[in-house]
C-alpha cells in the first residue's frame, strides 16, 4: 500500500498451504495446517514485486496474525528491505511462526509494536484505523484467526477494509454496537471461507468490491459458493486473485479504480 505522501505499508507476506497434511479436511476450515514455504513466496513473489516497484524500504510491515500463509513471507521482506517498524497483534511469542518472525525482525533491528482496536496510523491526508482485535476481548487459544488485525484505510471519500482471517466470532464482536461499517472495498476474510463473511458483516460494509485472495482451484474449496453469493447479493462485485491475478486498487480520494492483471473476456 502506497500512501499519497509516499509512506509504504505491507500487510502480510504470504506463504504456502500444506496440501499434504494428513489431518486436512476441506469441509472443516479450522483443521487447516501449513507447511514450510518451500517456494519461498516472500522472496520469489513479494520481494520481487516490491523490487520491481523500485522499493528498497518499507515503512511498516503488518502481520495480521500468525498463520504461516500470512506471516512467513514477511521474514524475507524483513531481510531484504529496510523496514521502519513491524506492527503485530497480541500473538504470543510461544507461537512458532510468530517467534520466528519476532527473531527475524529483532535480528534486523526492526522495532515491533503491538496494535489493537482504537489505534490510528495517521499519514498526510490518510489514516489506517485498527478495528480489531479489541484489547479487552478474550484472545483465541485454538486459532489465531479471530485475533487478526482488521484495518480500515481512509483517503478522502474512499475507504478500504483489510480483514486478515477474522471469522464469525470476531466479526460479531467487532460490530457490537455498530450498525454499519461502510467501505468501498473489502479484502474478504479468510480467503472466502464460510467461517467468515456473516450476513450481518457483509450487510454492514455495503462494499462495492469484495476482493478474495485465494489460489486457483483451492484445495480448501475457497472461496465457498455461499460466501461469493452473499457478497454478490448485497451488491458487491466479487474478484478473486485465482482468476484475476494481481488486483490493484487506486484512488485519489474521490474516484476509485480497480484493475486486474488478467482481463475478463471482452475487456
Image (spheres, helix red, strand yellow):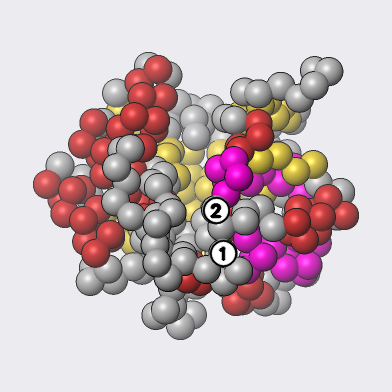
Q: Would residue 184 appear left or right of 35 to someone viewing this image?
A: right
Residue beneath the point at 57% across and 35% down: 125
Task: Look at the numbered disc 2 and give the secondary structure of its residue.
Answer: loop
Residue 90: x percent and y percent? 36, 68
* Residues shaded magenta: 192-218
In this view of the protein, can residue 175 be seen by the observer? yes
Q: Is residue 123 above or below residue 133?
A: above
Residue 251: x percent and y percent? 66, 29
Q: Are marks 1 and 2 in contact (CB under 8 Å)?
A: yes
Q: Quadrant of the C terminus?
A: top right
**Disc on res. 194:** none
Give the quadrant of residue 89: bottom left
Toward the viewer: 119 or 12? 12
Q: Is residue 225 above or below residue 245?
A: below
Q: Mark 1 = which residue?
A: 26
The mark nearer the N terminus, 1 or 2, is 1
Give the quadrant of residue 6: top left
Answer few, some or many: residues within 10 Å of disc 2's Cα (few below 14, many 20 plus, some between 14 and 19).
Answer: few
Toward the viewer: 254 or 242? 242
In this view of the protein, can residue 181 be seen by the observer? no
Task: Look at the numbered disc 1 and give the secondary structure of its residue.
Answer: loop
Give the CA distance from mark 1 to mark 2: 7 Å
Q: Mark 2 = which residue?
A: 219
Q: Is residue 245 above or below residue 158?
A: above
Q: Is residue 107 magenta?
A: no
Q: Is residue 194 magenta?
A: yes
Residue 117: x percent and y percent? 50, 66
Residue beneath the point at 63% across and 73% down: 168
Q: Would residue 107 appear left or right of 233 to someone viewing this image?
A: left
Q: Residue furthest left?
A: 107
Residue 252: x percent and y percent? 66, 26
Amino acid at each position: 500500500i502506497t500512501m499519497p505522501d509516499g509512506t509504504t505499508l505491507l500487510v502480510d507476506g504470504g506463504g504456502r498451504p500444506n496440501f499434504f497434511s494428513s489431518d486436512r479436511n476441506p469441509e472443516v476450515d479450522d483443521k487447516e495446517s501449513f507447511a514450510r514455504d518451500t517456494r519461498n513466496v516472500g522472496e520469489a513473489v513479494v520481494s520481487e514485486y516490491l523490487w520491481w516497484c523500485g522499493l528498497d524500504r518499507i515503512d511498516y510491515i503488518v502481520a495480521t496474525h500468525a498463520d504461516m500463509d500470512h506471516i512467513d513471507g514477511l521474514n524475507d521482506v524483513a531481510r531484504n528491505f529496510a523496514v521502519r517498524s513491524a506492527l503485530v497483534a497480541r500473538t504470543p511469542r510461544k507461537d512458532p511462526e510468530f517467534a520466528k518472525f519476532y527473531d527475524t525482525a529483532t535480528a534486523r533491528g526492526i522495532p515491533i509494536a503491538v496494535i489493537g482496536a482504537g489505534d490510528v496510523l495517521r499519514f498526510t491526508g490518510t489514516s489506517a484505523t485498527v478495528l480489531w482485535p479489541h484489547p479487552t476481548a478474550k484472545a483465541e487459544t485454538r486459532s489465531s484467526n479471530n485475533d487478526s488485525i482488521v484495518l480500515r484505510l481512509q483517503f478522502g471519500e474512499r475507504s478500504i477494509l483489510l480483514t486478515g482471517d477474522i471469522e464469525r466470532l470476531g466479526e460479531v464482536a467487532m460490530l457490537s454496537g455498530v450498525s454499519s461499517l461502510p467501505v468501498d472495498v473489502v479484502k474478504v476474510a479468510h480467503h472466502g471461507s464460510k467461517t467468515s463473511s456473516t450476513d450481518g458483516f457483509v450487510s454492514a460494509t455495503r462494499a462495492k468490491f469484495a476482493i478474495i485472495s485465494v489460489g486457483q482451484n483451492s484445495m480448501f474449496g475457497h472461496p465457498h459458493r455461499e460466501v461469493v453469493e452473499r457478497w454478490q447479493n448485497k451488491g458487491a462485485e466479487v474478484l478473486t486473485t485465482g482468476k484475476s491475478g494481481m488486483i490493484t486498487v487506486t484512488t485519489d480520494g474521490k474516484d476509485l479504480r480497480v484493475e486486474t492483471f488478467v482481463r475478463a473476456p471482452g475487456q
